[in-house]
Amino acid sequence: IYMKFSHPLMHNNFTSSDRNAAIKLLRTKNAILTQSKNVKKFEKAWSKWLGVKYSVFVNSGSSANLLTMSILKILYRKNEIIVPTLTWVSDINSVIQNNFKPVFVDINPNNLCMDENEIIKKANNKTLAVFLTHAQGFNGLSSKLINFLNKKKILLIEDVCESHGATFKNRKLGTFGKISNFSFYYAHHMSTIEGGMICTNDRKIYEIAKMLRSHGMAREANNIKFEKNMIKKYSDLSQKFIFLYSAYNFRNNEIGAVIGLNQLKLLNKNNKKRQKNFSLFLKLIDKNKYKTDFLIDGSCNYAFPLILRKPNYAFRKALENKLIENRIEFRRGNAGGGNQLRQPYLKSYIKKIHLSNFKQVEHIHFFGYYIGNYPSLKSNKIKKLANILNSVNVN
């Protein structure tokens, strides 16, 4: 229909202002580019924006996931963690890599997040935490779930990598859990090229996160009293090189931090545009063909979920052909490519699991997509997109 139409999945949100901020840093005499004062400044600004006490800037959202699970391994003894089946691979990998047992639950099709009734059903006295992914900008929390977790003393860990600025009861996601993780990958709400953040209100968790980020070194905790105790305890070691944990180098750098500080200024404004785009998109697409009844209260979507209302392979083929023909970039399976239980890395974990017990995520796996939503997207282009999508038919 539209000869020159094209719609990429991602619109690089790296602005000339971001470039200038990076150039200014690079032109500074004797500039330190590894983790230094701008990283601290960005962590403080992010904490203030989110509404938490502490944030730790790392090199990716996946590193944030891995460090978070490593912290739980250090501090707690219970060994089961409830995880979603629709999520990014690193959420589940981080659980496995820390020798926790992943317990999988299906999703709620109305927000693509974990089904709270399934969580309640599968929680037991071995459950340490629920690692909840706020998938594709949707809020996955409810009062019922929060009350249940509090009552059972089960930790909530929030993956907010795809949902910066989304809220529950007018409070930002990432402020409800014991720890929350964010990603600043270039396709997300804001970018530091590559990057992630670990957020918490717990001082001890904050200090362990900083140590784990930098090789497990005691001095990285930046706690003078604690450091003096460690120097006393390990008097045979060089004071600057006391490695308390088997850890990683997941530091980020000053260039990422100044870009992050610059992008943060526009985040609220850009999020409003994304929310407006998503509402218009849902209003315009054919509700008989595609799912439109999402729980959008508080959501902030960086992509448009496009989910077939009914399982239909002929329609799926026609839709994909139409998308390709009109150069509309897409991904099938939504967050992380669909049902993680079908992935090779989980083969040894799922011998006793029946995919038929995960009907909702199975539908997304085969009949769910996402396409691009970005702040620069204009309403007339969304109308054209909807017209193309609505024109898909199966004879």
Image: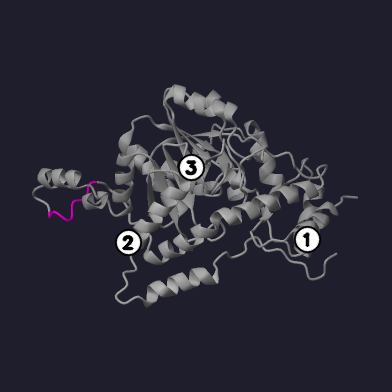
Disc 2 residue crowd, few under 14, some 14–19, many 20+, Cα 10 Å: some
- Badge 1 marks a residue whose secondary structure is helix
Expressed as whole percent of the image width and height from the top left, the position of residue 163 reads 56, 47
- Residue 275 position (above or below residue 72): below
Q: CA distance from mark 3 to mark 1?
A: 34 Å
- Residue 189 appears in which quarter of the rendering? bottom right
Q: Residue 21 shows which numbered tag? A: none
User: Mark 3 to mark 2: distance in Å?
Assistant: 24 Å
Q: Residue at x 47, y 27 (%)?
A: 149
- Mark in front: 3 vs 2: 2
Identify residue type, mark 1.
Asn
- Provide the residue designation for mark 3: 174
Q: Earlier in the sequence, mark 3 or mark 2?
A: 2
The residue at 49%/72% (across/down) is 19
Coloration mode = one colour
Q: Is residue 175 visible?
A: yes
Q: Horizontally, is 309 left or right of 150 in the view?
A: right
Residue 334 picture location, percent across and down: 64, 48
Q: Quadrant of residue 376?
A: bottom right
Local packing at callout 1 (Cα closer than 10 Å; few below 14, some 14-19, many 20+) is few
Write down the region rendered in magenta. Answer: 238-244
Front position in the image: 61 or 84: 61
Q: Earlier in the sequence, mark 3 or mark 1?
A: 3
Q: Circle 1 sits on which residue?
A: 380
Residue 240 highlighted magenta (yes or no):
yes
The quadrant of the image that shows the N terminus is bottom right
For the residue marked with disc 3, what is the amino acid?
Gly
Q: CA distance from mark 2 to mark 1?
A: 44 Å
* Secondary element type, mark 2: helix
The answer to whether marks 3 and 2 mark residues whose Cβ atoms lie closer than 8 Å is: no
What numbered label is drawn on residue 37? Answer: 2
